[in-house]
Amino acid sequence: MVLYSLFQGDFVVQEYKLHIGGESRDSATGETFDNINPATLENLATVQVAGSEDVDRAVEAAEEGFRVWSEVPAPRRAEVLFRTARILQERKEDLARLMTEEMGKVLPETRGDVQEAIDIAIYAAGEGRRMFGETTTSELKDKFCMTVLRPIGVVGMITPWNFPLAIPGWKIMPALIAGNAIVFKPASDTPLLAIKLVEILMEAGLPPGVVNLVTGPGGSTGKAIVQHPRIKAISFTGSLETGKWIMEECAKTMKRVSLELGGKNPVIIMDDADLELALEGVLWGAFGTTGQRCTATSRLILHEKIKDEFTARLLAKTKLLRVGNGLLPETDIGPIINKAQLEKIERYVRIGMEEGATLLLGGKAIDPGLPGYFFEPTVFTDVRPDMRIAQEEIFGPVLSIITVSGLEEAIEVANNTRYGLSSAIYTENVGKAFRAVKKIEAGITYVNAPTIGAEVHLPFGGVKGTGNGFREAGTEAIKEFTEIKAVYIDYSGRLQRAQIDME
């Protein structure tokens, strides 16, 4: 997919085309954008911008690809996914390092991101022999009833930058094993990982046109995908506001839409909890990926009996975290993805202080000796549940402490948000744990573990403003990309009418 190389100082900057119908294609717009390393501000690549004409071409290619791919038996489709997993495994370290350069998070995390793509490819491939329908009895004689799963057709996928292999993997692998074809738009902050993934899929034997890559802004390229009349379904991960717009647009043509729209995830720590275990979980949940994940721990709900002790431990440990280049082994927290996101985090810190929260630590951008976008791990206390910093997704290393007097109040506070993705409770009391599991309004609840760490064989997603009912990963992922068909086989040799012929 490389068009040509340009020299920028001592670096060779490559320009990348679109990938449509199994080939590299020039975009019709003639426009490009730069792919910037958020730690060093170096330009990693120049990438072409797809317009509506390019999306049209991608849909045409996908329709042709669908005609071929949907006729391949699912176990044969699985062979492509198994080969994809092997290639990803072979190139895991190179992909992880590229990911750190492209979006900033530290190498141990980017290795985990690649591993998740490997795992979902293997898991989805296994589903090629397990796409079960149901059989049931008929109310009539000599009649057989069953259901089968059928692919939807051409699916549009729009993915974020914070997990640039794992999230596309969650969407692409189940869609492929089900027999669909794809028009894929990655986030403009991380196009290179998407390009590498498509190249690997083609190398693994995916037929031309089954996956088509169009790069560009959400406001133009993404909009063209959502509004295209021949795209049958949209799978989107991103902000609540964009998700609402996508749902409204898809409703106009009765297009299926699957949304994962973020979270404001609580961790409850009761007075009987293992505080050292909880401390490790909060640090990882709040500041891993620089807080830039939908499952990040952003609200810490502390029982009043342990609030002072736990807060002191938290501050002491947080002060030891090192911010810098994610490629360096001593770095704990990498950069913020871009300038706009850095400014958004700074704005929320000001909002928190204006609302009356107490800033205990951090709260400002820092210079670790690099020109990129870095922000201190930040902790607020004296936070009320109705404050904006306790209600709105900040998507940065900002943690709000809310104090409660007991479990019921903690659950009430946890549920007091428009989101419902992930949640956690730390307690040694099994009764408290099960009450929390029962009453917390979230798609995921952890007991004695942080709010992150999804496993690919379990469904991922949330309730309320987090999503619209679909789940990614696990067996539920197949449902996102298939239609159910009911089949009736009447071998009686005569006309039978259900609900009428009861003899």
Image (cartoon, rainbow, N blue to C red):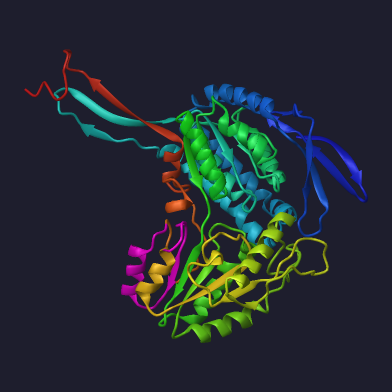
Relative horizontal placement of residue 119, taking residue 268 as reference (left or right): right
Is residue 123 a member of the stretch shown in magenta?
A: no
Query: In the rendered image, which quarter contains the N terminus?
Result: top right
Relative horizontal placement of residue 2, taking residue 467 as reference (left or right): right
Is residue 429 a member of the stretch shown in magenta?
A: yes
Judge by depth and name the residue closer to the eye, 144 or 353.
Answer: 353
Rendered location of residue 140, percent (x, y) = 14, 25
**34 to 338, vertically: above or below:** above
Q: Residue placed farthest to the right in the image?
A: 9
Judge by depth and name the residue closer to the eye, 221 or 413.
Answer: 413
| Rendering quarter of residue 59 | top right
* Extent of the magenta region: 416-442
Q: Residue placed farthest to the top in the image?
A: 494
Rendered location of residue 407, percent (x, y) = 37, 75
| Rendering quarter of residue 223 | top right
Relative horizontal placement of residue 289, taking residue 230 as reference (left or right): right
Query: In the rendered image, which quarter contains the C terminus?
Result: top left
**498 to 454, vertically: above or below:** above
